[in-house]
Image (cartoon, rainbow, N blue to C red):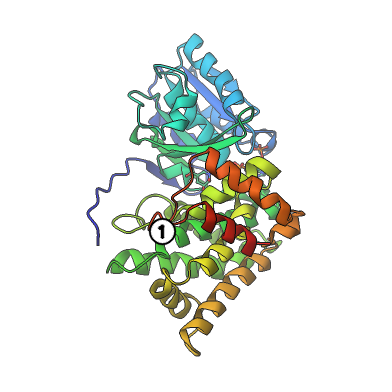
Amino acid sequence: MKYFDYYNPTRICFGENRVKDINALIPDNAKVLILFGGNSAKKAGTLDEVTNALGKREIILFGGVEANPTYEKMMAAVEIVRKEKIDFMVAVGGGSVIDGTKFVSAAALYQGEPWEIMTTGGKKISKTIPFGSVLTLPATGSEMNCGSVITHKAKHAKLSFMHPGVYPKFSILDPTKTYTLPKNQLANGIVDAFVHIVEQYLTYPTNAMVQDRYAESLLLSLIELAPKVLTDELDYNSRANFMWVATQALNGLIGAGVPQDWATHVIGHELTVRYNIDHARTLAIILPALLTVQQDSKKEKLLQYAKRVWNITKGSDEQIIKACITQTTEFFNSVGIKTSLTDYDINTDEIPEIVNQLKEHGMTALGEHKDIDLKISQRILETAL
Ligand code: NZQ
Ligand code: ZN
């Protein structure tokens, strides 16, 4: 196991009817900006619950945060925060609203042009504005981590930053908030969480027994939960378990002390920027192709994954690896998510352009060994056709 520091200061308030508890978690005299997306939080009544819970505090609402939040939109919130001297924020929504709020948290107090936060990965952040979240979509884990992904529309760039100052102070995880989610968003959440786990697990062995077994238990839980989450019946227990798996998938615990491979996400981000494909759907396209291309360096963990997650033990190593990648693809298909570039009308002649984007964004040494250069990314994209 590698050296690690593990620090996660986010308070999780889990269970039904917890929104009211934010009253005790925000200073009485705080001036609060509430950020939300399109109409879903309003329609479901969650926004009203949040404003009621804040009682007499002065509040300002900021709506319209897009899926894949943009620098352009979030800078409008930064202006409000600066002008109105906001000292606390509440994000009501999925990963996009929470990520957007994290950007505002750092950008409002940033010395310099805030896009630099993204191009430097958050390295120069000194101060942040505190915020909490009310999660409405289990998927990204943003509710309990210090990462954020922002798109610069004009620059055609989707980049991420991390900083300990942007851990949410609290996150409300009420599984009933997922009841209004359409099936395509539930499926996105299942796949996004699955891929987060895989990217911290399927690298090379480092004798990290706890992280491995924990990652496997999260994967097995997701596989068992997927059909239950996607039925028409609203089952509290399935939603509760799904919500907690998605949070645990990316709150730093399974990734502590182990190598990680975020190449699927990085290549996926280029597909979202270029073709506006949902985040999770880009991952379902890239992951099986990446596992295929990188199977030699991932061999031992692929065999472990095959055995412990998919119960595949018969055949040569090569056959076992092929079978577990097929199972992964079939799992994504089973929740209604397609896994080929051609399913999105993206053909061979587009690939050089995607590779060019990776180059422009400096994504030339990816993966747990930093050996995924532009040539290998190209091969991964060709395998994903
Ligand atoms: O905008 P509204 O009307 O709220 O609708 C949203 C949005 O259209 C809707 N929705 C959310 N909760 C709902 C609901 N609809 C009905 N009922 C509810 N309860 O769902 C749509 C998608 O929401 P979004 O927040 O965009 O989805 P998700 O949570 O999947 O977030 C995706 C973003 O997170 C980033 C992605 O890159 C993408 O930009 N990621 C962030 C990460 C992190 N911070 O750690 C890690 C991830 O890998 C990911 O990259
Ligand atoms: Zn993701």
Residue 149 x/y as whole percent = 51, 38
In the image as oriented, which residue stretches furthest toward the bottom? Answer: 314
Question: Furthest-right residue in view?
Answer: 345
Q: Is mark 1 within 8 Å of ligand 1?
A: no
Q: Quadrant of ligand 1?
A: top right
Q: Is residue 177 visible?
A: no
Q: Is residue 345 left or right of residue 381?
A: right
Quarter of the image containing the N terminus?
bottom left
Q: Is residue 299 above or below residue 26?
A: below
Q: Label 1: state its secondary structure.
A: helix
Image coordinates for residue 324, horizontal then vertical, percent: 53, 76
Q: Is residue 89 above or below residue 385?
A: above
Could you tell me residue 111's position as x and y percent? Answer: 39, 16
Q: Position of residue 83 (x, y in %)?
A: 50, 9
| Residue on which disc 1 sits | 200
Q: Residue furthest left?
A: 3
Please give the name of the residue rendered at 58% of the width and 56% of the height, measured from the top-left corner: 378
Amino acid tagged 1: Gln
Comparing 131 with 55, the one in front is 131
220 vs 17: above or below: below
**226 is higher (above) or lower (below) than 33:** below
Q: Residue at x 40, y 24 (%)?
A: 129
Question: Can the viewer see residue 77 in this picture?
Answer: yes
Nearest the camera: 385 or 88?
A: 385
Q: Residue furthest top?
A: 83
Q: Residue at x 66, y 52 (%)?
A: 351
Rendered-image quadrant of the C terminus: bottom right
Quarter location, residue 327: bottom right
